[in-house]
């Protein structure tokens, strides 16, 4: 360093003022971080973006970095400044320092990065408190390793689709259960009740559905105004007729929902071999159901279509496995015949071809394990 300083004095200019931008960028990286005013001067005056990016890496002034992240004309410098600002927040020495830096972070993606990766719990929670964007919050729930931070982020999510997704697909019990508690749509709860990966989440959704009054009965209460105490007999009779009509509508609605649910459950429980017959029967039953409209109808229709597709897939896999079973049984029979062939040279040649075919069949994912074991037992090398 003393030699380079001597060379710089002999030259009359420091290397960070060299005509070559590459030399300037390398020289800036050697400037100590304590030379904050020099670095800021370079960032204000340097025309080359790569030199400014090098200076950003050395600067620890959060306010200055925030200005660069918003105002620098080069996107790379803006990104570098924002990333360095996030790093300062993540690795702040104490709560006060972290909060002062976070106050300058405005981009929701960058706040989510701090909430996801900061080692200090207080910093993570402070970042979550600044988050509003639903997808940024969802990123924290999915990617943060700390359960407390994940739950804090989930508590700020009110997007129905995101909540239903966490309740249905999360493998973390606490997250799935917390998401279930925030779902208000009955159709979404019904999907979670049948499809949740975490069993406890499915059971909780079922419990909520069991306690909630059926939607049609809620409409009965809402549709009927309070009967005046002074109502005469004619008004009371009309009121009772309307109540009876609405209650009948509620029963019809509930029966339609129940019938569709039964069809779906029967189809979902059908075995692979019987899937075609189960699908045919389910389609006939579905076509004969009483009409139903609304979100529940849409959710149940999606469930029915998914059950049909799953049944078709199960049956196709079953048919393919049965076909392979027959092919492998034929290979076994040929192998046993070769073992009795008196012409050993011919038998060895045929056996090697048979072994290659066996390897092909036995390594197929859907080959039944029991047949794979039979092949291994029978396909012993001919002596």
Image (cartoon, grey):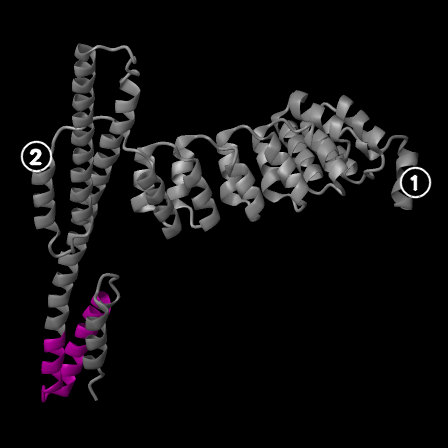
Residue 218, numbered circle: none
Crowd tier of the residue under label 1, counting other residues whose Cα lies within 10 Å: few below 14, some 14–19, many 20 or above: few
x 20%, y 85%: residue: 382
Quadrant of the snapshot with the N terminus:
top right
Q: Earlier in the sequence, mark 1 or mark 2?
A: 1
Secondary structure, magenta segment, majority class: helix
**Element type where label 2 sits in the image:** loop
Residue 288, numbered circle: 2
Q: Which residue is mark 1?
A: 6
x 66%, y 29%: residue: 105
Q: Above or below — where is 150 with respect to 249?
A: below
Name the image quarter holding residue 52: top right
Name the image quarter holding residue 279: top left
Residue 76 in the figure: left or right of residue 372: right
Residue nearer the viewer, 354 or 111: 111
Q: Is residue 304 magenta?
A: no
- Answer yes or no: is residue 346 visible: no
The range drawn in magenta is 332-361
Q: Above or below — where is 45 with respect to 310?
A: above
Q: Is residue 335 magenta?
A: yes
């Amino acid at each position: 360093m003393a030699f380079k300083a001597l060379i710089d004095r002999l030259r009359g200019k420091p290397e960070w003022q060299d005509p070559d931008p590459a030399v300037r960028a390398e020289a800036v990286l050697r400037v100590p971080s304590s030379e904050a005013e020099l670095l800021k001067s370079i960032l204000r005056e340097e025309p080359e973006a790569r030199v400014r990016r090098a200076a950003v890496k050395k600067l620890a002034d959060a306010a200055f970095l925030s200005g660069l992240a918003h105002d620098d004309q080069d996107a790379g410098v803006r990104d570098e400044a924002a990333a360095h600002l996030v790093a300062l927040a993540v690795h702040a020495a104490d709560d006060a320092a972290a909060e002062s830096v976070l106050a300058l972070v405005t981009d929701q993606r960058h706040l989510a990065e701090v909430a996801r990766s900061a080692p200090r719990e207080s910093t993570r929670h402070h970042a979550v408190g600044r988050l509003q964007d639903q997808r940024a919050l969802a990123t924290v729930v999915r990617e943060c390793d700390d359960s407390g931070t994940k739950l804090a982020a989930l508590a700020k999510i009110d997007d129905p689709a995101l909540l239903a997704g966490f309740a249905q697909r999360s493998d973390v019990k606490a997250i799935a259960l917390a998401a279930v508690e925030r779902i208000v749509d009955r159709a979404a709860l019904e999907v979670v009740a049948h499809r949740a990966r975490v069993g406890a989440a499915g059971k909780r959704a079922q419990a909520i559905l069991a306690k909630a009054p059926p939607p049609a009965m809620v409409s009965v209460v809402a549709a009927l105004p309070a009967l005046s105490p002074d109502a005469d007999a004619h008004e009371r009779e009309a009121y009772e007729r309307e109540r009876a009509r609405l209650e009948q509508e509620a029963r019809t609605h509930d029966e339609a929902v129940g019938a569709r649910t039964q069809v779906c459950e029967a189809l979902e429980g059908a075995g692979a071999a019987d899937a075609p017959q189960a699908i045919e029967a389910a389609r006939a039953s579905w076509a004969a159901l009483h009409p139903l409209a609304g979100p529940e109808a849409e959710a149940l229709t999606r469930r029915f279509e998914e059950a049909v597709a799953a049944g078709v897939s199960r049956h196709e896999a079953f048919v393919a496995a049965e076909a392979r079973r027959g092919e492998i049984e034929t290979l076994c029979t040929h192998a046993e015949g070769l073992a009795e062939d008196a012409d050993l040279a011919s038998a060895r040649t045929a056996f090697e071809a048979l072994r290659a075919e066996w390897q092909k069949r036995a390594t197929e994912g859907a080959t039944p394990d029991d047949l794979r074991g039979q092949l291994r037992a029978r396909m012993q090398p001919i002596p």
